[in-house]
Image (tube, rainbow, N blue to C red):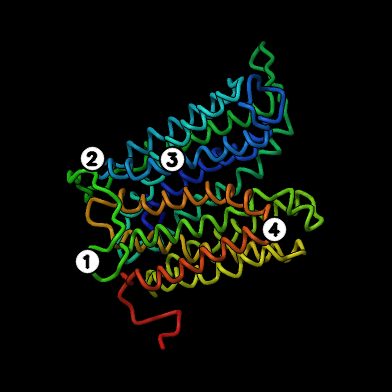
């Protein structure tokens, strides 16, 4: 924790980041395990007239479509009560219970119900943990704290799928408990592992995290998301603008995942190279989120966001024309650099703008927008690719270009500095 303080990172933020990383490992297991589980013989009953592939897409997308619209309400409720920790703990309990319950599921309806429960859990956890980071940080180190938090969270999200396939393939597992011989399938082992990571995260948050004393309950009601700038300095509210930019970014980075089979055939590659291409984006995020976040505390936030959105245009579009697997890895890594330049700085800038006691509702605009983007991107690419392989990537690049214009014209800098990473004339 001494290193954290020297880097300007609040020790509680580091603990919260580790807790989210632990929970993310188990939760991201399900991205790999659930499609395999649906494709196995473990489930019975109706598929609602849909193919297993369609059911898989609905089950995976349901998490985002449930949690995203709920985030402004849970974020605002945490503002009203002046408490964040209890929302995180309840969410972790729901994540753990749902993860264990997958081992008892026998029909497709069970999966839909459990995934919806996890969506509610995500709505309780996501905006309140980001608000906690914002509350624990100051304007002088908010970027570094946001970057560190996102680094650990993404590390967990990236590590989970790598281990999940191996755990499922390694089953069944046999062991003895005294005189009792026990055997569990690879699927059940993965579900139990996800339950364990949620439990560990619960223990960390329960024992080591406290609500900041400086946060006071805000009883001004729920209100709504401001779309237009009430100050008269611009047309759109700056937080809303950052939310739109986060949505555009999330759509662009989520286009890739749905097209695995098409990309493998187009590039004449196997699933291993596709996995490397997918992981390249996450690796860039892990390496760069924290240093970029700290840099925004020195050089300002807006210029990093603009630079990231500008870089997102070519790095997204080029994925639609590349024919070499290794160039695709480079493009995905570069797209990850662009994402790192946008996400943590945008959260930090929105945190700077958040009124006292309203971190939850303010930052939930960005987390909700990102969640919707991640859910919408795969659906958009599945439809648009029928018009041509390059079309979904051109669509994502166009959204990023619109994001550049919006942030450049509608968002003002919040950090006072004389240094700049972009030319000023």
Quote the CA–CA distance across marks 3 and 2: 20 Å
Give the image quarter of residue 112.
top right
Q: Which residue does the image show at 69% across and 58% down from the upper left? A: 388
Which residue corresponds to mark 3?
A: 67
Which residue corresponds to mark 4?
A: 388
Q: Position of residue 247 (x, y in %)?
A: 46, 56
Q: Position of residue 416 (x, y in %)?
A: 30, 75
Q: Which residue does the image show at 43% across and 40% down from the upper left? A: 67
Q: Nearer the viewer, residue 70 or 383?
A: 383
Query: In front: mark 4 or mark 1?
Result: 4
Q: Is residue 43 above or below residue 321?
A: above
- Number of residues whose C-alpha sits closer than 10 Å to that of mark 3, classed few (under 14), some (14–19) or many (20 or more): many
Residue sitting at the far front:
387
Q: Position of residue 294 (x, y in %)?
A: 42, 67
- Provide the secondary structure element on which disc 4 rests: loop
Mark 1 and mark 3 in contact (Cβ < 8 Å)?
no
Mark 4 and mark 2 in contact (Cβ < 8 Å)?
no
Considering only order in the chain, which callout, 4 or 2, is on the residue closer to the N terminus? 2
Query: In front: mark 3 or mark 2?
Result: 3
């Amino acid at each position: 924790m001494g290193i954290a303080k020297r880097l300007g990172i609040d020790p509680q933020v580091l603990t919260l980041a580790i807790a989210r990383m632990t929970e993310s490992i188990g939760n991201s297991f399900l991205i790999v395990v659930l499609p395999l589980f649906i494709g196995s013989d473990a489930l019975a009953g109706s598929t609602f007239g849909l193919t297993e592939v369609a059911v898989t897409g609905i089950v995976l997308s349901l998490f985002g479509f449930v949690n995203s619209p709920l985030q402004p309400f849970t974020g605002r409720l945490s503002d009203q009560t002046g408490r964040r920790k209890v929302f995180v703990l309840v969410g972790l309990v729901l994540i753990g219970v749902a993860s264990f319950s997958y081992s008892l599921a026998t029909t497709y309806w069970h999966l839909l119900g459990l995934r919806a429960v996890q969506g509610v859990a995500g709505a309780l956890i996501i905006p309140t943990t980001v608000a906690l980071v914002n509350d624990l940080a100051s304007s002088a180190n908010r970027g570094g704290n946001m970057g560190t938090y996102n680094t650990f969270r993404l590390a967990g999200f990236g590590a989970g799928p790598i281990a999940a396939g191996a755990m499922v393939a390694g089953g069944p597992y046999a062991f003895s408990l005294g005189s009792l011989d026990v055997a569990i399938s690879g699927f059940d082992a993965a579900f139990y592992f996800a339950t364990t990571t949620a439990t560990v995260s619960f223990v960390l948050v329960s024992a080591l995290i406290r609500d900041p004393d400086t946060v006071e309950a805000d009883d001004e009601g729920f209100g709504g998301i401001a779309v237009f700038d009430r100050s008269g300095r611009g047309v759109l509210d700056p937080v809303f603008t950052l939310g739109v930019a986060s949505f555009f970014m999330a759509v662009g980075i989520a286009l890739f995942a749905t097209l695995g089979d098409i990309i493998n055939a187009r590039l004449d590659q196997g699933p291993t190279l596709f996995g490397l291409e997918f992981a390249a984006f996450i690796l860039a995020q892990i390496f760069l989120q924290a240093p970029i976040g700290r840099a925004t505390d020195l050089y300002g936030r807006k210029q990093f966001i603009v630079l990231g959105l500008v870089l997102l245009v070519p790095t997204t579009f080029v994925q639609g024309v590349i024919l070499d697997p290794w160039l695709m890895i480079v493009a995905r890594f570069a797209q990850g650099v662009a994402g790192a330049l946008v996400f943590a700085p945008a959260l930090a800038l929105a945190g700077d703008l958040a009124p006292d006691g309203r971190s939850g509702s303010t930052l939930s605009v960005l987390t909700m927008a990102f969640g919707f983007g991640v859910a919408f991107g795969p659906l958009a690419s599945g439809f648009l690719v029928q018009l041509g392989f390059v079309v979904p990537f051109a669509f994502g690049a166009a959204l990023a270009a619109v994001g550049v214009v919006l942030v450049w014209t509608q968002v003002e800098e919040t950090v006072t500095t004389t240094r700049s990473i972009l030319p000023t004339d």
